[in-house]
Image (cartoon, rainbow, N blue to C red):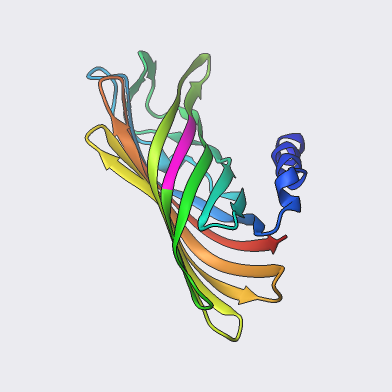
Amino acid sequence: MLKKTMIPMTLLIASPLTAFANTSLIVEAGHVKNTFNKVKIDGEEGSLFNLAPALDDKIFYRLSLIHKFSSPHGFRLLYAPLEFNGDKRYSKDINFGGVNFISGKKTDVEYSFNSYRGTYFYEILADNNLLVRLGGTLKVRDAKIELSQDDRKKFKKNTGIVPLFYFYSEYKWDNGFNIAFDFDGLAAPQGRAFDMALMGGYAFSPSYKMNLGFRMLEGGVDNEKVYNFSQINYSFASLQINF
Protein backbone atom coordinates (compact mmCIF):
# COMPACT_ATOMS: atom_id res chain seq x y z
CA MET A 1 0.00 0.00 0.00
CA LEU A 2 2.81 2.41 0.85
CA LYS A 3 4.50 1.81 -2.50
CA LYS A 4 1.23 2.43 -4.36
CA THR A 5 0.81 5.70 -2.47
CA MET A 6 4.35 6.96 -2.89
CA ILE A 7 4.62 6.36 -6.65
CA PRO A 8 1.93 8.87 -7.75
CA MET A 9 3.01 11.35 -5.06
CA THR A 10 6.60 11.17 -6.27
CA LEU A 11 5.56 11.61 -9.88
CA LEU A 12 3.55 14.71 -9.09
CA ILE A 13 6.03 16.34 -6.75
CA ALA A 14 8.99 15.56 -8.98
CA SER A 15 7.26 16.86 -12.11
CA PRO A 16 9.23 19.63 -13.79
CA LEU A 17 6.00 21.63 -13.94
CA THR A 18 6.28 22.35 -10.24
CA ALA A 19 9.26 24.54 -11.02
CA PHE A 20 7.00 26.90 -13.01
CA ALA A 21 5.14 29.86 -11.56
CA ASN A 22 1.35 29.53 -11.19
CA THR A 23 1.56 25.84 -10.29
CA SER A 24 -0.27 24.29 -7.32
CA LEU A 25 -0.07 20.89 -5.67
CA ILE A 26 -3.19 19.95 -3.67
CA VAL A 27 -3.24 17.02 -1.24
CA GLU A 28 -6.75 16.08 -0.10
CA ALA A 29 -7.46 13.45 2.58
CA GLY A 30 -10.20 12.45 4.97
CA HIS A 31 -13.11 10.07 5.63
CA VAL A 32 -15.17 8.41 2.89
CA LYS A 33 -18.41 6.40 3.10
CA ASN A 34 -20.35 4.54 0.41
CA THR A 35 -23.98 5.43 1.23
CA PHE A 36 -25.63 3.34 -1.49
CA ASN A 37 -24.38 1.08 -4.26
CA LYS A 38 -26.98 -0.81 -6.32
CA VAL A 39 -25.50 -3.53 -8.55
CA LYS A 40 -26.72 -6.05 -11.12
CA ILE A 41 -24.27 -8.19 -13.14
CA ASP A 42 -24.99 -9.37 -15.90
CA GLY A 43 -28.11 -8.25 -17.75
CA GLU A 44 -31.49 -9.85 -17.07
CA GLU A 45 -30.20 -12.91 -15.20
CA GLY A 46 -28.21 -11.05 -12.55
CA SER A 47 -29.60 -10.18 -9.11
CA LEU A 48 -30.10 -6.56 -8.09
CA PHE A 49 -28.61 -5.99 -4.63
CA ASN A 50 -27.13 -3.24 -2.48
CA LEU A 51 -23.37 -3.47 -2.10
CA ALA A 52 -23.03 -0.50 0.29
CA PRO A 53 -24.00 -2.19 3.63
CA ALA A 54 -21.10 -4.63 3.16
CA LEU A 55 -18.47 -1.91 2.68
CA ASP A 56 -16.52 -0.40 5.58
CA ASP A 57 -15.78 3.33 5.76
CA LYS A 58 -12.27 4.29 4.69
CA ILE A 59 -9.59 6.95 4.88
CA PHE A 60 -8.91 8.33 1.42
CA TYR A 61 -6.55 10.69 -0.36
CA ARG A 62 -6.42 12.57 -3.67
CA LEU A 63 -3.61 14.41 -5.42
CA SER A 64 -4.08 17.28 -7.86
CA LEU A 65 -1.58 19.28 -9.87
CA ILE A 66 -2.88 22.55 -11.36
CA HIS A 67 -0.92 24.77 -13.71
CA LYS A 68 -2.06 28.10 -15.14
CA PHE A 69 -0.22 29.61 -18.08
CA SER A 70 0.42 33.35 -18.42
CA SER A 71 -2.80 33.44 -20.47
CA PRO A 72 -6.17 32.47 -18.92
CA HIS A 73 -5.61 28.88 -20.05
CA GLY A 74 -4.51 26.09 -17.71
CA PHE A 75 -4.75 22.41 -16.90
CA ARG A 76 -5.27 20.06 -13.97
CA LEU A 77 -4.06 16.50 -13.38
CA LEU A 78 -5.92 14.46 -10.77
CA TYR A 79 -5.12 11.08 -9.19
CA ALA A 80 -7.99 9.74 -7.05
CA PRO A 81 -7.63 6.13 -5.87
CA LEU A 82 -10.58 4.64 -4.02
CA GLU A 83 -11.12 1.12 -2.67
CA PHE A 84 -13.65 -0.33 -0.22
CA ASN A 85 -13.90 -3.80 1.25
CA GLY A 86 -15.94 -5.63 3.88
CA ASP A 87 -18.40 -8.49 4.27
CA LYS A 88 -22.10 -9.18 4.74
CA ARG A 89 -24.57 -12.06 5.14
CA TYR A 90 -27.22 -11.31 2.54
CA SER A 91 -30.83 -12.40 3.15
CA LYS A 92 -31.31 -13.66 -0.41
CA ASP A 93 -29.30 -15.60 -2.96
CA ILE A 94 -27.34 -13.37 -5.36
CA ASN A 95 -26.59 -14.24 -8.96
CA PHE A 96 -23.48 -12.19 -9.72
CA GLY A 97 -22.07 -12.69 -13.20
CA GLY A 98 -23.44 -16.23 -13.43
CA VAL A 99 -22.12 -17.32 -10.01
CA ASN A 100 -24.69 -17.95 -7.27
CA PHE A 101 -23.82 -16.66 -3.77
CA ILE A 102 -25.93 -18.33 -1.09
CA SER A 103 -27.97 -16.31 1.41
CA GLY A 104 -27.02 -16.38 5.07
CA LYS A 105 -23.34 -17.09 4.45
CA LYS A 106 -20.61 -14.51 4.86
CA THR A 107 -19.82 -12.86 1.54
CA ASP A 108 -16.58 -10.91 1.23
CA VAL A 109 -16.90 -7.84 -0.96
CA GLU A 110 -14.40 -5.55 -2.67
CA TYR A 111 -15.30 -2.38 -4.57
CA SER A 112 -12.76 -0.10 -6.23
CA PHE A 113 -13.32 3.04 -8.28
CA ASN A 114 -9.99 4.60 -9.20
CA SER A 115 -10.01 7.80 -11.23
CA TYR A 116 -7.32 9.49 -13.32
CA ARG A 117 -8.25 12.82 -14.88
CA GLY A 118 -6.81 15.45 -17.15
CA THR A 119 -8.59 18.81 -17.36
CA TYR A 120 -8.20 21.83 -19.62
CA PHE A 121 -9.73 25.03 -18.24
CA TYR A 122 -10.17 28.69 -19.14
CA GLU A 123 -10.44 31.40 -16.48
CA ILE A 124 -13.45 33.47 -17.49
CA LEU A 125 -13.07 35.65 -14.40
CA ALA A 126 -10.01 36.23 -12.22
CA ASP A 127 -9.66 39.25 -9.96
CA ASN A 128 -8.50 39.86 -6.40
CA ASN A 129 -11.62 38.27 -4.90
CA LEU A 130 -13.38 36.04 -7.43
CA LEU A 131 -12.07 33.20 -9.59
CA VAL A 132 -14.21 31.25 -12.10
CA ARG A 133 -12.90 28.45 -14.33
CA LEU A 134 -14.72 26.51 -17.06
CA GLY A 135 -13.34 23.56 -18.97
CA GLY A 136 -13.46 19.92 -19.95
CA THR A 137 -12.13 16.77 -18.30
CA LEU A 138 -11.17 13.38 -19.67
CA LYS A 139 -11.60 10.83 -16.91
CA VAL A 140 -10.11 7.33 -17.01
CA ARG A 141 -12.32 5.11 -14.85
CA ASP A 142 -10.80 1.93 -13.41
CA ALA A 143 -13.57 0.12 -11.52
CA LYS A 144 -13.90 -3.36 -10.04
CA ILE A 145 -16.51 -5.28 -8.03
CA GLU A 146 -15.59 -8.64 -6.50
CA LEU A 147 -17.61 -11.11 -4.41
CA SER A 148 -16.20 -14.23 -2.74
CA GLN A 149 -17.80 -16.88 -0.57
CA ASP A 150 -16.05 -20.12 0.41
CA ASP A 151 -14.76 -21.52 -2.90
CA ARG A 152 -16.87 -19.17 -5.00
CA LYS A 153 -15.34 -16.01 -6.40
CA LYS A 154 -16.40 -13.65 -9.17
CA PHE A 155 -15.33 -10.17 -10.19
CA LYS A 156 -16.34 -7.60 -12.78
CA LYS A 157 -13.90 -4.99 -14.05
CA ASN A 158 -14.79 -1.91 -16.03
CA THR A 159 -12.25 0.48 -17.52
CA GLY A 160 -13.18 3.35 -19.78
CA ILE A 161 -12.74 7.01 -20.70
CA VAL A 162 -15.50 9.46 -19.78
CA PRO A 163 -15.71 13.13 -20.88
CA LEU A 164 -16.89 15.54 -18.17
CA PHE A 165 -17.73 19.22 -17.84
CA TYR A 166 -15.48 21.09 -15.38
CA PHE A 167 -16.43 24.12 -13.26
CA TYR A 168 -14.55 25.76 -10.40
CA SER A 169 -15.47 28.92 -8.51
CA GLU A 170 -13.72 30.51 -5.53
CA TYR A 171 -14.40 33.69 -3.56
CA LYS A 172 -11.54 35.11 -1.48
CA TRP A 173 -11.97 37.69 1.25
CA ASP A 174 -9.20 40.21 1.90
CA ASN A 175 -8.52 38.66 5.33
CA GLY A 176 -7.34 35.37 3.76
CA PHE A 177 -10.52 33.29 4.12
CA ASN A 178 -12.13 31.67 1.08
CA ILE A 179 -15.05 29.53 -0.04
CA ALA A 180 -14.99 27.37 -3.18
CA PHE A 181 -17.09 24.98 -5.27
CA ASP A 182 -15.48 22.28 -7.44
CA PHE A 183 -17.39 20.24 -10.05
CA ASP A 184 -16.76 17.54 -12.67
CA GLY A 185 -19.84 15.99 -14.23
CA LEU A 186 -21.98 14.95 -17.17
CA ALA A 187 -25.18 12.97 -17.79
CA ALA A 188 -26.11 10.83 -20.80
CA PRO A 189 -28.78 8.18 -21.58
CA GLN A 190 -26.26 5.42 -20.72
CA GLY A 191 -25.44 6.84 -17.28
CA ARG A 192 -24.06 9.80 -15.38
CA ALA A 193 -21.10 10.93 -13.28
CA PHE A 194 -21.03 13.83 -10.83
CA ASP A 195 -18.12 14.77 -8.56
CA MET A 196 -18.75 17.95 -6.58
CA ALA A 197 -17.22 19.56 -3.51
CA LEU A 198 -17.99 22.56 -1.33
CA MET A 199 -15.08 23.78 0.78
CA GLY A 200 -13.81 26.72 2.75
CA GLY A 201 -10.51 27.64 4.34
CA TYR A 202 -7.72 30.07 4.95
CA ALA A 203 -4.58 31.13 3.06
CA PHE A 204 -1.73 31.34 5.55
CA SER A 205 0.54 32.92 2.93
CA PRO A 206 0.75 33.18 -0.88
CA SER A 207 2.31 29.69 -0.81
CA TYR A 208 0.04 27.74 1.58
CA LYS A 209 -3.72 27.34 1.86
CA MET A 210 -5.79 24.86 3.87
CA ASN A 211 -9.45 23.94 3.27
CA LEU A 212 -12.11 21.84 4.97
CA GLY A 213 -14.96 20.50 2.90
CA PHE A 214 -17.54 17.95 1.85
CA ARG A 215 -17.46 16.05 -1.46
CA MET A 216 -20.05 13.84 -3.13
CA LEU A 217 -19.39 11.36 -5.94
CA GLU A 218 -22.59 10.10 -7.56
CA GLY A 219 -23.49 8.29 -10.75
CA GLY A 220 -23.41 5.01 -12.57
CA VAL A 221 -24.11 3.07 -15.73
CA ASP A 222 -27.06 1.07 -17.07
CA ASN A 223 -26.55 -1.22 -20.05
CA GLU A 224 -27.12 -4.85 -21.06
CA LYS A 225 -24.15 -6.15 -19.07
CA VAL A 226 -23.79 -3.79 -16.11
CA TYR A 227 -26.16 -1.94 -13.82
CA ASN A 228 -24.38 0.00 -11.09
CA PHE A 229 -25.35 3.29 -9.43
CA SER A 230 -23.72 4.55 -6.26
CA GLN A 231 -23.22 7.56 -4.03
CA ILE A 232 -20.01 8.17 -2.11
CA ASN A 233 -19.66 10.92 0.50
CA TYR A 234 -16.36 12.46 1.59
CA SER A 235 -15.41 14.80 4.43
CA PHE A 236 -11.89 16.12 3.99
CA ALA A 237 -9.08 18.52 4.70
CA SER A 238 -6.82 19.72 1.92
CA LEU A 239 -3.47 21.48 1.74
CA GLN A 240 -2.63 23.57 -1.31
CA ILE A 241 1.02 24.45 -2.00
CA ASN A 242 1.63 27.16 -4.58
CA PHE A 243 4.95 27.29 -6.41
Q: Quadrant of the C terminus?
A: bottom right
The foreground one among 118 and 92 is 118
Q: Quadrant of the N terminus?
A: top right
Q: Position of residue 150 (x, y in %)?
A: 53, 18
Magenta residues: mostly which secondary structure?
Answer: strand
Residue 135 visible? The answer is: yes
Q: State the residue lying farthest toward the front.
A: 71
The foreground one among 181 and 156 is 181
Q: Is residue 158 above or below residue 91?
A: above
Q: Is residue 125 above or below residue 17?
A: below
Q: Position of residue 185 (x, y in %)?
A: 37, 47
Residue at 71 percent across and 35 percent down: it is 4
User: For the magenta stretch, what is the residue range?
Assistant: 136-142
Q: Position of residue 162 (x, y in %)?
A: 40, 34
Residue at 57 percent across and 85 percent down: it is 174
Residue at 77 percent across and 44 percent down: it is 14
Left or right: 202 with respect to 226? right
The foreground one among 143 and 91 is 143
Left or right: 221 with respect to 110? left
Q: Is 2 in the magenta?
A: no
